[in-house]
Amino acid sequence: MDWLNEDQRALRDMAANFARKELEPIANQIDIDEHTPDELVEKAAALGLYGLYTSPEYGGSGADLVSVCVVSEELAKASPSFAGMLTVQMVLCPKAVEILGTEEQKQRILTAHASGERLMAYSQSEPAGAANIGSHLTRIVPDDDTPAGGYRIDGAKLFCTQGTAKTFLVMAKTKDRGGNEGYGCAIVETEDEGFEVAHYEDKLGWRGTNTGPISFNNVRLEAGDILGDILTGGFSHRAANHANLLAHVATSIGCAQGLFDKTMDYVQQRRLYGRDMAELQPIGYWLAEAHAKITACRALLYDTVRQFEAGTVAPEAGNICKAFIGETIFEVCVKLLQMWGGSGIMNSTGVNRYMRDARAKCVAEGATEMHYAIIANQLLHNQPTLVPSNIVKAAAS
Protein backbone atom coordinates (compact mmCIF):
# COMPACT_ATOMS: atom_id res chain seq x y z
CA MET A 1 0.00 0.00 0.00
CA ASP A 2 2.62 2.49 -1.14
CA TRP A 3 -0.09 5.03 -2.00
CA LEU A 4 -0.71 5.84 1.67
CA ASN A 5 0.24 9.37 2.63
CA GLU A 6 2.58 10.24 5.48
CA ASP A 7 -0.15 10.61 8.10
CA GLN A 8 -1.78 7.33 7.09
CA ARG A 9 1.55 5.51 7.29
CA ALA A 10 2.18 6.96 10.74
CA LEU A 11 -1.20 5.72 11.96
CA ARG A 12 -0.58 2.30 10.40
CA ASP A 13 2.77 2.02 12.17
CA MET A 14 1.26 3.15 15.47
CA ALA A 15 -1.48 0.53 15.20
CA ALA A 16 0.98 -2.18 14.20
CA ASN A 17 3.17 -1.34 17.19
CA PHE A 18 0.18 -1.40 19.54
CA ALA A 19 -0.96 -4.73 18.10
CA ARG A 20 2.48 -6.25 18.47
CA LYS A 21 3.19 -5.04 22.00
CA GLU A 22 -0.22 -4.92 23.64
CA LEU A 23 -2.60 -7.17 21.68
CA GLU A 24 -0.56 -10.11 20.42
CA PRO A 25 0.68 -11.31 23.83
CA ILE A 26 -2.86 -11.59 25.24
CA ALA A 27 -4.99 -12.13 22.11
CA ASN A 28 -5.45 -15.85 22.69
CA GLN A 29 -6.27 -15.32 26.35
CA ILE A 30 -8.90 -12.73 25.38
CA ASP A 31 -10.55 -15.41 23.25
CA ILE A 32 -10.38 -18.05 25.99
CA ASP A 33 -11.60 -15.74 28.77
CA GLU A 34 -14.24 -14.05 26.57
CA HIS A 35 -13.11 -10.76 28.04
CA THR A 36 -11.08 -7.76 26.93
CA PRO A 37 -9.09 -6.37 29.87
CA ASP A 38 -10.06 -2.88 30.99
CA GLU A 39 -6.44 -1.77 30.82
CA LEU A 40 -6.33 -2.62 27.11
CA VAL A 41 -9.38 -0.44 26.52
CA GLU A 42 -7.68 2.36 28.46
CA LYS A 43 -4.47 2.02 26.44
CA ALA A 44 -6.45 2.22 23.18
CA ALA A 45 -8.19 5.35 24.48
CA ALA A 46 -4.86 6.90 25.44
CA LEU A 47 -3.73 6.52 21.82
CA GLY A 48 -6.84 8.38 20.67
CA LEU A 49 -8.29 5.39 18.82
CA TYR A 50 -11.87 5.96 19.97
CA GLY A 51 -11.88 9.46 18.57
CA LEU A 52 -9.90 8.66 15.43
CA TYR A 53 -12.82 9.32 13.04
CA THR A 54 -14.42 12.07 15.15
CA SER A 55 -13.97 15.73 14.27
CA PRO A 56 -11.37 17.69 16.28
CA GLU A 57 -13.96 20.11 17.66
CA TYR A 58 -15.41 17.18 19.62
CA GLY A 59 -12.13 15.82 20.89
CA GLY A 60 -11.26 13.56 17.97
CA SER A 61 -8.48 13.37 15.40
CA GLY A 62 -10.61 13.90 12.30
CA ALA A 63 -8.80 11.14 10.41
CA ASP A 64 -10.13 9.92 7.07
CA LEU A 65 -11.73 6.53 6.49
CA VAL A 66 -8.62 5.15 4.80
CA SER A 67 -6.74 5.73 8.05
CA VAL A 68 -9.50 4.08 10.07
CA CYS A 69 -9.46 1.00 7.83
CA VAL A 70 -5.67 0.77 7.93
CA VAL A 71 -5.73 0.91 11.73
CA SER A 72 -8.55 -1.67 11.89
CA GLU A 73 -6.66 -4.04 9.62
CA GLU A 74 -3.45 -3.82 11.63
CA LEU A 75 -5.21 -4.47 14.93
CA ALA A 76 -7.14 -7.40 13.46
CA LYS A 77 -3.91 -9.15 12.50
CA ALA A 78 -3.40 -9.74 16.22
CA SER A 79 -6.99 -9.82 17.49
CA PRO A 80 -9.92 -9.66 15.05
CA SER A 81 -12.22 -9.67 18.07
CA PHE A 82 -10.76 -6.51 19.59
CA ALA A 83 -10.55 -4.80 16.20
CA GLY A 84 -14.20 -5.59 15.45
CA MET A 85 -15.33 -4.06 18.72
CA LEU A 86 -13.16 -1.01 18.13
CA THR A 87 -14.58 -0.25 14.67
CA VAL A 88 -18.02 0.27 16.18
CA GLN A 89 -16.42 2.65 18.68
CA MET A 90 -14.34 4.45 16.06
CA VAL A 91 -16.94 4.76 13.31
CA LEU A 92 -20.57 3.74 13.69
CA CYS A 93 -21.53 5.22 17.04
CA PRO A 94 -19.61 8.52 17.04
CA LYS A 95 -20.31 9.26 13.38
CA ALA A 96 -24.04 8.65 13.88
CA VAL A 97 -24.02 11.20 16.71
CA GLU A 98 -21.96 13.63 14.66
CA ILE A 99 -24.34 13.36 11.69
CA LEU A 100 -27.62 13.47 13.61
CA GLY A 101 -26.87 15.18 16.90
CA THR A 102 -27.51 18.69 18.10
CA GLU A 103 -24.51 20.73 19.18
CA GLU A 104 -25.36 19.99 22.80
CA GLN A 105 -25.52 16.25 22.14
CA LYS A 106 -22.22 16.29 20.26
CA GLN A 107 -20.43 18.18 23.01
CA ARG A 108 -21.93 16.01 25.73
CA ILE A 109 -21.46 12.61 24.11
CA LEU A 110 -18.60 12.79 21.64
CA THR A 111 -16.07 14.54 23.85
CA ALA A 112 -16.46 11.94 26.61
CA HIS A 113 -16.42 9.15 24.05
CA ALA A 114 -13.27 10.32 22.26
CA SER A 115 -11.37 10.28 25.55
CA GLY A 116 -12.56 6.75 26.32
CA GLU A 117 -14.49 8.01 29.33
CA ARG A 118 -17.91 6.93 28.06
CA LEU A 119 -18.01 4.33 25.31
CA MET A 120 -21.04 3.66 23.13
CA ALA A 121 -23.00 0.73 21.70
CA TYR A 122 -25.36 0.52 18.71
CA SER A 123 -28.49 -1.60 18.84
CA GLN A 124 -30.92 -2.43 16.05
CA SER A 125 -31.50 -6.21 15.68
CA GLU A 126 -34.63 -7.70 17.24
CA PRO A 127 -35.95 -11.26 17.66
CA ALA A 128 -38.56 -10.65 14.96
CA GLY A 129 -36.09 -9.50 12.32
CA ALA A 130 -32.79 -7.73 11.70
CA ALA A 131 -32.91 -5.67 8.50
CA ASN A 132 -36.68 -5.98 8.20
CA ILE A 133 -37.52 -3.11 10.52
CA GLY A 134 -41.18 -3.43 9.60
CA SER A 135 -41.29 -6.40 11.98
CA HIS A 136 -39.58 -4.60 14.85
CA LEU A 137 -41.55 -4.22 18.06
CA THR A 138 -39.47 -1.76 20.08
CA ARG A 139 -41.30 1.58 20.20
CA ILE A 140 -40.45 5.18 21.07
CA VAL A 141 -43.64 7.12 21.75
CA PRO A 142 -44.58 10.44 23.38
CA ASP A 143 -44.85 10.33 27.15
CA ASP A 144 -46.96 13.00 28.82
CA ASP A 145 -45.47 12.11 32.21
CA THR A 146 -41.98 13.10 31.08
CA PRO A 147 -41.23 16.84 31.38
CA ALA A 148 -40.48 19.08 28.41
CA GLY A 149 -42.07 16.93 25.73
CA GLY A 150 -40.29 13.67 26.46
CA TYR A 151 -40.78 10.11 25.26
CA ARG A 152 -40.63 6.56 26.53
CA ILE A 153 -39.15 3.44 24.98
CA ASP A 154 -40.34 -0.14 25.41
CA GLY A 155 -39.09 -3.33 23.82
CA ALA A 156 -36.05 -5.58 23.48
CA LYS A 157 -33.01 -5.95 21.25
CA LEU A 158 -30.69 -8.85 20.43
CA PHE A 159 -26.98 -9.24 19.68
CA CYS A 160 -25.95 -5.86 21.02
CA THR A 161 -22.16 -5.63 21.13
CA GLN A 162 -21.67 -3.78 24.37
CA GLY A 163 -18.10 -3.98 25.60
CA THR A 164 -17.88 -1.44 28.40
CA ALA A 165 -20.49 0.82 26.84
CA LYS A 166 -22.35 3.36 28.95
CA THR A 167 -24.34 5.05 26.18
CA PHE A 168 -26.56 3.09 23.77
CA LEU A 169 -27.88 4.29 20.41
CA VAL A 170 -31.16 2.42 19.98
CA MET A 171 -33.10 2.20 16.70
CA ALA A 172 -36.86 1.78 17.04
CA LYS A 173 -40.24 2.50 15.50
CA THR A 174 -41.45 5.93 16.56
CA LYS A 175 -44.50 8.14 16.83
CA ASP A 176 -44.54 11.89 17.19
CA ARG A 177 -47.14 13.95 19.02
CA GLY A 178 -49.11 14.39 15.84
CA GLY A 179 -49.59 10.63 15.46
CA ASN A 180 -47.15 10.30 12.54
CA GLU A 181 -45.06 7.14 12.58
CA GLY A 182 -41.47 6.61 11.52
CA TYR A 183 -38.17 5.06 12.54
CA GLY A 184 -35.84 6.91 14.87
CA CYS A 185 -32.92 6.69 17.24
CA ALA A 186 -32.83 7.20 21.01
CA ILE A 187 -29.90 7.80 23.34
CA VAL A 188 -30.24 5.48 26.34
CA GLU A 189 -27.83 5.45 29.27
CA THR A 190 -27.04 2.38 31.35
CA GLU A 191 -28.25 4.13 34.49
CA ASP A 192 -31.69 4.91 33.03
CA GLU A 193 -34.43 3.26 35.08
CA GLY A 194 -36.08 0.38 33.24
CA PHE A 195 -33.07 -0.31 31.02
CA GLU A 196 -31.48 -3.74 31.49
CA VAL A 197 -28.40 -5.37 30.00
CA ALA A 198 -29.06 -9.12 30.17
CA HIS A 199 -26.66 -12.07 30.09
CA TYR A 200 -23.75 -12.20 27.69
CA GLU A 201 -23.83 -14.84 24.96
CA ASP A 202 -21.21 -17.59 24.62
CA LYS A 203 -20.16 -17.11 20.99
CA LEU A 204 -18.31 -19.02 18.27
CA GLY A 205 -16.17 -16.02 17.43
CA TRP A 206 -15.64 -12.42 18.50
CA ARG A 207 -15.33 -13.85 21.99
CA GLY A 208 -13.48 -10.82 23.32
CA THR A 209 -16.57 -8.65 22.87
CA ASN A 210 -19.58 -8.77 25.15
CA THR A 211 -22.69 -9.48 23.07
CA GLY A 212 -26.18 -10.04 24.38
CA PRO A 213 -29.79 -8.87 24.66
CA ILE A 214 -30.95 -5.59 26.16
CA SER A 215 -34.45 -4.56 27.18
CA PHE A 216 -36.45 -1.41 27.86
CA ASN A 217 -39.33 -1.36 30.31
CA ASN A 218 -41.00 2.03 30.18
CA VAL A 219 -37.66 3.85 29.96
CA ARG A 220 -38.34 7.57 30.02
CA LEU A 221 -36.46 9.85 27.66
CA GLU A 222 -36.16 13.59 27.61
CA ALA A 223 -36.53 15.44 24.34
CA GLY A 224 -32.73 15.78 24.21
CA ASP A 225 -32.39 11.98 24.22
CA ILE A 226 -33.79 11.69 20.69
CA LEU A 227 -31.00 11.66 18.12
CA GLY A 228 -32.04 13.49 14.98
CA ASP A 229 -35.64 13.76 13.83
CA ILE A 230 -38.03 11.50 15.74
CA LEU A 231 -39.45 10.11 12.47
CA THR A 232 -36.35 9.85 10.29
CA GLY A 233 -33.35 9.59 12.60
CA GLY A 234 -33.10 5.85 12.03
CA PHE A 235 -32.60 6.45 8.30
CA SER A 236 -30.53 9.61 8.32
CA HIS A 237 -27.07 8.27 9.19
CA ARG A 238 -26.52 5.94 6.24
CA ALA A 239 -23.08 7.47 5.74
CA ALA A 240 -22.10 6.25 9.22
CA ASN A 241 -23.45 2.77 8.46
CA HIS A 242 -21.64 2.67 5.12
CA ALA A 243 -18.34 3.78 6.66
CA ASN A 244 -18.74 1.25 9.45
CA LEU A 245 -19.28 -1.59 6.98
CA LEU A 246 -16.05 -0.73 5.22
CA ALA A 247 -14.08 -0.50 8.47
CA HIS A 248 -15.59 -3.81 9.52
CA VAL A 249 -14.43 -5.37 6.25
CA ALA A 250 -10.93 -4.11 6.98
CA THR A 251 -10.93 -6.21 10.15
CA SER A 252 -11.86 -9.26 8.06
CA ILE A 253 -8.86 -8.67 5.80
CA GLY A 254 -6.62 -8.17 8.83
CA CYS A 255 -7.99 -11.42 10.25
CA ALA A 256 -6.89 -13.38 7.18
CA GLN A 257 -3.57 -11.56 6.95
CA GLY A 258 -2.79 -12.32 10.58
CA LEU A 259 -3.46 -16.03 10.09
CA PHE A 260 -1.57 -16.01 6.78
CA ASP A 261 1.53 -14.52 8.44
CA LYS A 262 1.43 -17.09 11.23
CA THR A 263 0.89 -19.91 8.73
CA MET A 264 3.85 -18.79 6.63
CA ASP A 265 6.09 -18.94 9.68
CA TYR A 266 4.68 -22.35 10.63
CA VAL A 267 5.15 -24.08 7.29
CA GLN A 268 8.68 -22.70 6.91
CA GLN A 269 9.72 -24.13 10.27
CA ARG A 270 8.00 -27.52 10.18
CA ARG A 271 9.25 -30.77 8.63
CA LEU A 272 6.63 -33.17 7.32
CA TYR A 273 7.11 -36.63 5.79
CA GLY A 274 10.86 -36.17 5.99
CA ARG A 275 10.85 -32.90 4.04
CA ASP A 276 10.47 -29.22 4.74
CA MET A 277 6.72 -28.61 4.73
CA ALA A 278 7.13 -25.56 2.48
CA GLU A 279 8.53 -27.80 -0.27
CA LEU A 280 5.34 -29.85 -0.53
CA GLN A 281 3.60 -28.78 -3.73
CA PRO A 282 0.03 -28.34 -2.38
CA ILE A 283 1.31 -26.06 0.40
CA GLY A 284 2.81 -23.61 -2.05
CA TYR A 285 -0.38 -23.55 -4.10
CA TRP A 286 -2.55 -23.03 -1.05
CA LEU A 287 -0.39 -20.18 0.21
CA ALA A 288 -0.33 -18.55 -3.22
CA GLU A 289 -4.10 -18.81 -3.50
CA ALA A 290 -4.60 -17.31 -0.04
CA HIS A 291 -2.20 -14.46 -0.81
CA ALA A 292 -3.94 -13.74 -4.11
CA LYS A 293 -7.39 -13.63 -2.52
CA ILE A 294 -6.29 -11.43 0.39
CA THR A 295 -4.57 -9.05 -2.03
CA ALA A 296 -7.64 -8.87 -4.29
CA CYS A 297 -9.97 -8.28 -1.35
CA ARG A 298 -7.73 -5.50 -0.04
CA ALA A 299 -7.70 -3.83 -3.47
CA LEU A 300 -11.50 -3.94 -3.66
CA LEU A 301 -11.91 -2.54 -0.17
CA TYR A 302 -9.55 0.40 -0.47
CA ASP A 303 -10.77 1.32 -3.93
CA THR A 304 -14.28 1.47 -2.45
CA VAL A 305 -13.06 3.45 0.56
CA ARG A 306 -11.44 6.05 -1.69
CA GLN A 307 -14.65 6.32 -3.71
CA PHE A 308 -16.53 6.80 -0.45
CA GLU A 309 -14.17 9.60 0.56
CA ALA A 310 -14.61 11.23 -2.85
CA GLY A 311 -18.40 10.99 -2.63
CA THR A 312 -18.64 8.84 -5.76
CA VAL A 313 -19.35 5.45 -4.20
CA ALA A 314 -22.34 3.38 -5.39
CA PRO A 315 -25.13 2.86 -2.83
CA GLU A 316 -24.55 -0.88 -2.67
CA ALA A 317 -20.71 -0.75 -2.59
CA GLY A 318 -20.43 -1.34 1.14
CA ASN A 319 -22.80 -4.29 0.90
CA ILE A 320 -20.73 -5.76 -1.93
CA CYS A 321 -17.55 -5.49 0.12
CA LYS A 322 -19.16 -6.90 3.24
CA ALA A 323 -20.75 -9.90 1.51
CA PHE A 324 -18.07 -10.85 -1.00
CA ILE A 325 -14.96 -10.11 1.04
CA GLY A 326 -16.42 -11.57 4.22
CA GLU A 327 -17.15 -14.96 2.64
CA THR A 328 -13.89 -15.00 0.68
CA ILE A 329 -11.88 -14.29 3.80
CA PHE A 330 -13.61 -17.10 5.67
CA GLU A 331 -12.72 -19.53 2.86
CA VAL A 332 -9.11 -18.34 3.04
CA CYS A 333 -8.97 -18.87 6.79
CA VAL A 334 -10.40 -22.39 6.48
CA LYS A 335 -7.68 -23.33 3.96
CA LEU A 336 -4.92 -21.71 6.01
CA LEU A 337 -6.02 -23.50 9.16
CA GLN A 338 -5.98 -26.83 7.31
CA MET A 339 -2.22 -26.47 6.91
CA TRP A 340 -1.84 -26.60 10.69
CA GLY A 341 -3.33 -30.09 10.84
CA GLY A 342 -4.15 -31.22 14.36
CA SER A 343 -2.34 -28.24 15.85
CA GLY A 344 -4.89 -25.93 14.28
CA ILE A 345 -7.69 -27.54 16.24
CA MET A 346 -5.98 -26.91 19.56
CA ASN A 347 -6.87 -23.66 21.29
CA SER A 348 -3.37 -23.51 22.74
CA THR A 349 -1.87 -22.59 19.35
CA GLY A 350 -4.15 -19.56 19.13
CA VAL A 351 -4.86 -19.90 15.41
CA ASN A 352 -8.32 -21.43 15.19
CA ARG A 353 -9.78 -18.23 16.64
CA TYR A 354 -8.99 -16.53 13.32
CA MET A 355 -11.27 -18.93 11.47
CA ARG A 356 -13.98 -18.56 14.11
CA ASP A 357 -13.72 -14.77 14.04
CA ALA A 358 -13.88 -14.79 10.24
CA ARG A 359 -17.10 -16.82 10.41
CA ALA A 360 -18.57 -14.45 12.99
CA LYS A 361 -17.74 -11.52 10.74
CA CYS A 362 -19.91 -13.02 8.01
CA VAL A 363 -22.88 -12.55 10.33
CA ALA A 364 -21.97 -9.49 12.41
CA GLU A 365 -23.01 -6.15 10.89
CA GLY A 366 -25.56 -8.01 8.78
CA ALA A 367 -25.41 -11.58 7.47
CA THR A 368 -24.11 -12.19 3.96
CA GLU A 369 -27.55 -13.05 2.64
CA MET A 370 -28.99 -9.80 3.93
CA HIS A 371 -26.34 -7.81 2.06
CA TYR A 372 -26.91 -9.73 -1.16
CA ALA A 373 -30.65 -9.10 -0.78
CA ILE A 374 -29.93 -5.36 -0.46
CA ILE A 375 -27.72 -5.50 -3.56
CA ALA A 376 -30.44 -7.35 -5.48
CA ASN A 377 -33.01 -4.79 -4.40
CA GLN A 378 -30.78 -1.99 -5.61
CA LEU A 379 -30.13 -3.70 -8.94
CA LEU A 380 -33.74 -4.64 -9.64
CA HIS A 381 -35.68 -1.80 -8.06
CA ASN A 382 -33.12 0.98 -7.54
CA GLN A 383 -33.81 0.87 -3.81
CA PRO A 384 -30.72 1.02 -1.56
CA THR A 385 -32.37 -0.62 1.46
CA LEU A 386 -34.91 -3.26 2.40
CA VAL A 387 -36.95 -0.87 4.52
CA PRO A 388 -40.66 -1.59 4.01
CA SER A 389 -42.32 1.05 1.84
CA ASN A 390 -44.93 1.94 4.44
CA ILE A 391 -42.22 2.81 6.97
CA VAL A 392 -40.30 4.84 4.40
CA LYS A 393 -43.42 6.82 3.52
CA ALA A 394 -44.27 7.42 7.16
CA ALA A 395 -40.73 8.54 7.95
CA ALA A 396 -40.67 10.90 5.00
CA SER A 397 -44.04 12.46 5.79
Image (cartoon, rainbow, N blue to C red):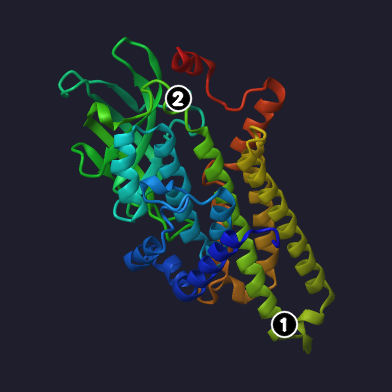
Q: Is residue 53 above or below residue 83?
A: above
Q: Going by the picture, which residue comes out furthest to the right?
A: 281
Q: How many marks?
A: 2
Q: Nearer the viewer, residue 327 or 396?
A: 396
Horizontal side of 207 relative to 376 (left or right) equals left
User: Which quadrant, please, contains the N terminus?
Assistant: bottom right
Up-down relation of residue 327 to residue 347 (above or below):
above
**Relative to 186, residue 331 above or below:** below
State the image coordinates of residue 173 (x, y, percent, origin top left): 38, 24
> Which residue lies under the disc numbered 1?
268
Residue 135: give its label: 2
Can see residue 78? no
Residue at 67 percent of width and 79 percent of height:
265
Q: Secondary structure at mark 1?
A: helix
Q: Residue furthest top?
A: 178
Q: Position of residue 226 (x, y in %)?
A: 31, 29
Residue located 60% across and 76% down the image:
343
Residue at horizontal 65%, vertical 59%? 4
Which is more N-terminal, label 1 or label 2? 2
Report how far apart the C-alphas of labels 2 and 1 lie in the structure: 53 Å
The part of the image, by quadrant, that contains residue 77 is: bottom right
- Could you say where residue 268 lies in the image, as x and y percent from the top left? 72, 82
Q: Would residue 145 appear left or right of 284 to someone viewing this image?
A: left
Identity of the amino acid at label 2?
Ser
| Residue type marked 1 | Gln
Label placed on residue 327: none
Q: Is residue 105 visible?
A: yes
| Image coordinates for residue 364, horizontal then vertical, percent | 52, 47
Q: Residues within 10 Å of mark 1 (few under 14, many from 20)?
A: few
Judging depth in this view, the residue of 6 and 52 nearest the camera is 6
